Image: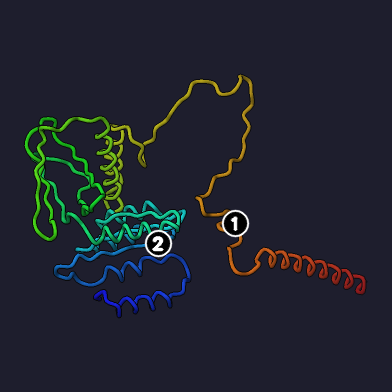
Amino acid sequence: MPVDPATVAQARRFVAGLRARGGTEMLPALTAALAGEASAGVLRQVVFLTDGAVGNEDALFALIRARLGDRRLYTVGIGPAPNAWFMQKAAQEGRGTYTFIGDVRETATKMTALFRKLESPVLTDLAVEWPSTAEIWPARLPDLFAGEPLSMTAALPADARSGDVVVRGRLDGAPWSARLPLAGAVPQAGVGALWGRAKIDSLMDAMRHGAPEDATRAEVVRVALAHRLVSRYTSLVAVDATPSAPPGSVAAASRIALPLPEGLSHEAILGVPQTATPMPALLAGGAAALLAALALLVVLRRREVEIGG
């Protein structure tokens, strides 16, 4: 729909009439947002905003891959504990970006920055051409926006130190390209680990898409060991040979409380939900009534026994 006073007023009336209920059901909403055919000359952008712990990740990823088309998907997580992993991966699948708003007081600032970014993409449909065979991660690049760097890693043959890297894209709808000479590249420590981490992430994504786990596991282990990375199948073990307790002392077990994310409470998750009613008082009153009823039942039973006897 065109953005004019009438449609904006209609959208405001629709939102004002919404009533929250149930859980975080994002699949129907995302299905509706990704419906419809492409429009010529229009870059369609979807903003996925939630404060919930989305749990059906695989179904949502499958929907994004099947329905994204020429759209871009931008995710926004609000609150102390959204599913950040899913939001980041969904933005990656959707060729967009992820925005995290940990404090509601930051909402206006961060959403304004997001909408400003959506209005002015610098380069779209990016692709990189290498002078020799290269293994690149991520394999598909998102759009490039003003003030937001975009990085990728590539593994090249040891003798590939000449030629140009060609970056292509579209700037304001017109073709754009640039050449970067490889001759001036300087080796840096740690780049290999970045490439390895990106490859492991891609392998795990492929397994979620249906790749066989045995082959995926073998390749993940190979890359992780080569670059000394922690993964689903590898760990780093630190062994300290220095004694931490005097010889002959007996170890004692103790319980350690796990901290909750800021903004959440133990009572809200494991206790009584926060509602408009005095629930703790009602529970106490109900428990007292049950005890009184139990005591009265015992007394009546005793009287029946005495009368019967």
Q: Quadrant of the C terminus?
A: bottom right
Q: Is residue 127 above or below residue 237?
A: below
Which residue is under mark 1? 267
Q: Give the SS element for disc 2.
A: strand
Residue 180: name its quadrant. Answer: top left
Q: Position of residue 276 (x, y in %)?
A: 60, 69
Q: Position of residue 86 (x, y in %)?
A: 36, 54
**Camera-side residue: 240 or 182?**
182
Residue 109: name its quadrant. Answer: bottom left
**Camera-side residue: 248 or 38?**
38
Q: Where is residue 299 in the image (x, y as percent from the top left)?
A: 86, 69
Q: Indicate the amino acid at tag 2.
A: Thr
Which residue is under mark 2? 50
Query: With 60 as the anchor, is 304 left or right in this view?
Result: right
The residue lying at 43 percent from left, 60 percent from top is: 51
Q: Where is residue 259 in the image (x, y as percent from the top left)?
A: 54, 46
**Camera-side residue: 178 or 199?**
178
Q: In this view, does 18 lie above or below 27?
A: below
Task: Point out the residue furthest to the left here.
Answer: 163
Q: How crowded is mark 2: few (under 14 residues within 10 Å), some or many (20 or more)?
A: some
Query: With 129 as the anchor, is 251 left or right in this view?
Result: right
